[in-house]
Image (spheres, rainbow, N blue to C red):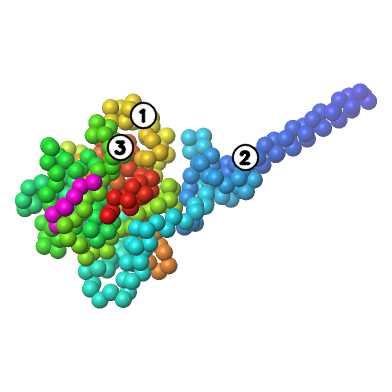
Amino acid sequence: MRRMLVVLFYVAISFISNAVGVEKKFHNLDLLGIPVGSNHFRSCNTDEVCIKITECRETVESWERERTCDFKGGQSYVCCKVSPPKENKSRKKCLSLYKQRETIQDESLITPISRSDVSAVGGENAAFNEFPYMAALGWGSGQRKEDFLCGGVLIDPFYVLTAAHCTSIDGEPPNIIRIGGRNLLERNTIDINPDKIIIHPDYDPNVAYHDIALIKLKSRVRFLPACLWTHSTPTTQKLVALGYGHTTFAGENSNILQKVNITLFDNAECQKVYSGQQSTPNGITRNQICAGDFIGMRDTCQGDSGGPLLAMVKIGNLEIPQVIGITSLGSVCAGGVPSIYTRVSDYVDWIESSMI
């Protein structure tokens, strides 16, 4: 009987010890941001981004369970604080234009903020003057919507940012840059001829890497530009893509500017799809951004190339458009496969040095 009690005592001690070990293990999982016994995920603050725990630069010791924002694919995601973007020359100049907006009398220079929900494919028509910095690259007379085959974004009164592969179609550069309109065929647009096309020196037309270019305009544009995002990570996963491209796969271009709400994906997700393809022989690189729609209903499409991927960032009382990416490469439109965008923050130094 005494021996049995001793055995039971050791069994109980072992059970308690194991329970403590399990609790310690769960506690460690909590520190790694993995929710235990809970499906509650917090929303990140405006100065945070929901990314994989392994991609957050903060130390493991500072992570808490309450910072978990998602859990998918066996990976825990945490709200990670991002440092403010670098105040580059172009960014300072752009922000100063927005800070002066309240003193500007010319209403055409002021960007109205649309309060409608953002819903390209699966998108919705942009409001009048909602994105006056949107550009369309045209070949021909500009009398038909079919003349405009690529997009771009005004980032300076004299410069439009676009994709490198949009600077030549059938060996011809664009001869019209149409800026400021919601409808390509309405008169509230401005047509300007390109003065100079500057393609990134590392761009190879046979692949999708370094797919970025600048178009210098022959005259100054009086619309407010969009600003360049200079940090590698956006502060939000919800982004807006703009384009005049097809609203259905292999359909017709839209003369009405389309806006579509899409979400950042991990580059690893796109790696599964694009790795080894002719246009991405090295897979998806850090110079690219992967974004799309988790349910495959919204996407950019043919004709949207060169258009901007935007984050609307609030600075003080102003909501300022920040160019996160440039539409570069896609698969079947809204087919559940994310599209690839050139990561603008990796090219800010080149952009600034090229804007002479």
Quickly name the residue at label 3: 202
Query: Mark 3 vs mark 1: which is more N-terminal?
Result: 3
Could you tell me which secondary element the residue under label 2 belongs to?
A: helix
Query: Mark 2 vs mark 1: which is more N-terminal?
Result: 2
User: What residue is rendered at 33% in x and 62% in y?
Assistant: 94
CA gap between label 2 and label 1 equals: 34 Å
Task: Say whether marks 3 and 1 touch (CB < 8 Å).
Answer: no
Decide which of 287, 324 is in the foreground and name it. 287
Q: Quadrant of residue 225?
A: bottom left
Where is residue 206? Give x, y as percent.
24, 31
Decide which of 93, 116 is in the foreground and name it. 93
- The residue segment tinted magenta is 192-198
Which circle marks residue 222 in the picture? Answer: none
Three-letter amino acid code of the residue under disc 2: Leu
Q: Is residue 218 magenta?
A: no
Three-letter amino acid code of the residue under disc 1: Asn
Decide which of 29, 185 is in the foreground and name it. 185
Quadrant in the picture for the N terminus = top right
Of circles 2 and 3, the one toward us is: 3
Query: Mark 2 vs mark 3: which is more N-terminal?
Result: 2
